[in-house]
Each structure stands twice: as C-alpha cells, then as structure tokens.
Amino acid sequence: GAGVSQSPRYKVAKRGQDVALRCDPISGHVSLFWYQQALGQGPEFLTYFQNEAQLDKSGLPSDRFFAERPEGSVSTLKIQRTQQEDSAVYLCASSRSRGSMNTEAFFGQGTRLTVV
Amino acid sequence: EDKVVQSPLSLVVHEGDTVTLNCSYEVTNFRSLLWYKQEKKAPTFLFMLTSSGIEKKSGRLSSILDKKELFSILNITATQTGDSAIYLCATYTGTASKLTFGTGTRLQVTL
C-alpha cells in the first residue's frame, strides 16, 4: 500500500481483556517496528522485526505483550489481560533497510488503546 | 542508556516568527539523527542527518547536526498555523535496531 496502515484506529478495552492490534507495513519494507507512546511522551521502542524474524523484543514491558509477523509482512501486537497502564497510542513503523542502516522509518496513524 | 533531550518542551509563537528547536543526545555508537513532525498521531519524516555541519533544507524548514557537541537544531522560518505540531527528534545507533526518541517540542503558532 501507499503507507503504513494500522487498525483499529481506536480501541477501548475493559481491564483484563485481550487485544490485538494490526499493522500493514509499506509493501516490500524489510524492517517493522512497534512503539508505544504515552500521553505527553515520545514514542518508546517495543520490538523490531526483520522480515519474519523478531530480532529485538527488549522493549516489551511484560510477558503480557506479544508480537508476530509470520509471513514477513503484516504484523500483530497482542496484549493479554490489559491493564490501565497499557493505555497509550501504539505506533507501527516500517523501513526498507535492515535495522539501523541509514534510512528513515515511516509511521502509521497508530492505534489509541484505552483500558477502562 | 541512550538519551535524547529536546528543548523547549513547548513553545507558542505568532505567525511569521522564526523558531529554533533543540535536540541533544547521549548515545552509544551514534549513526544518525532524525526529525519528525507529529500532528494527531502519525509522526511524519522531516530530515535525517548523519554528517556534521551540513544543513538540510526543505522549504521553510532546515536542520543541522553538530556531532562534536552532540546536538541538532530544527529551524522554521516564517511560521504558519499549519506548523503547529509536536516535533520529535530521534537517534539511530549502530548497536540497536531502533529509534530512541526525545519527548518532543510542542509548537503552537497563533494568528
């Protein structure tokens, strides 16, 4: 597609519910990143995929967070047993290069998750 | 731990003013510094800087990197209300495949 597409745009979950957030990267982009952005903060890194391989998950805050990219394109971020502190905007980004080579990452519109 | 600090945190200017946004960094194995504009939710790419002293320019926006003093500035001349947004600075390093972001500068341009 023309840009990074995320769905849903908004999600309200009751505390304890599981949620799944989807990211469609730009076609052909090798690298895919998930970030979490709390209100008034910059995005914080969660995890990184190079094609279907999850090469870095050091930013995932707990084992309730799980991400996959089984065919090297679409990715899903799953949060189990959501808690109020999970409320944030979840941003997905993709880039055509591998990892930290010097090309820019393009971001999707994000999913705003509110846990009530 | 890698750190990116932006200043000021917020700024209100009148249309037509020139603004300078600051970004300083302390990171291991620095590769590049990026500026993004965030309106509503999606950060949109502005500049990527890898070399010291070379200004990048796009219309009324320009940016430069100083790798000795570990900072970058983003200049916006003749500001317009459409420039109102959060401006994010981020660094890429050679040791990790991720961008480390600052908290952003919230710019409001008033009539």
Image (cartoon, coloured by chain):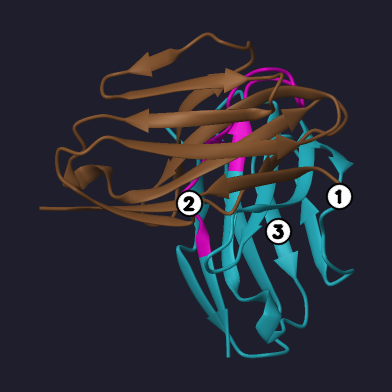
Query: Which residue position is annotated with label 2?
Result: B8
Q: Looking at numbered disc 3 in the image, what kind of residue is underneath it?
A: Leu
Q: Colour of chain B?
A: brown
Spatial CA distance of label 1 from label 2 is: 31 Å
Query: Which residue position is annotated with label 3?
Result: A77
| Quarter of the picture holding the N terminus of chain A | top left
Quadrant of the rendered image containing residue B101: top right
Q: Is residue B48 left or right of residue B78?
A: right
Which chain, by letter, is cyan?
A: A
Q: Is residue A105 magenta?
A: yes
Mark 2 surroundings: few (<14), some (14-19) or many (≥20) residues within 10 A: some
Q: Looking at numbered disc 1 in the image, what kind of residue is underneath it?
A: Lys
Image height of A111 relative to B53, above or below = below
Which residue in the rendered view is the most extreme toward the front?
A: B69
Mark 1–mark 3 CB contact (< 8 Å): no
Q: Which residues are magenta?
A: A93-111
Q: Position of residue B81 (x, y in %)?
A: 18, 47
Residue B102: assigned label = none
Q: Position of residue A65 (x, y in %)?
A: 80, 66
Q: Position of residue A109 (x, y in %)?
A: 45, 51
Same-chain check, marks 1 and 2: no
Query: Which residue position is annotated with label 1?
Result: A57
Task: Name the subunit of mark 3.
Answer: A
What is the magenta segment's predominant secondary structure? loop
* Residue at x 82% of width, y 54% of height: A59
Dot 3: element: strand
Image height of B86 relative to A29, above or below = below
Viewer-side label of 1, 2: 2
| Quarter of the picture holding the C terminus of chain A | bottom right
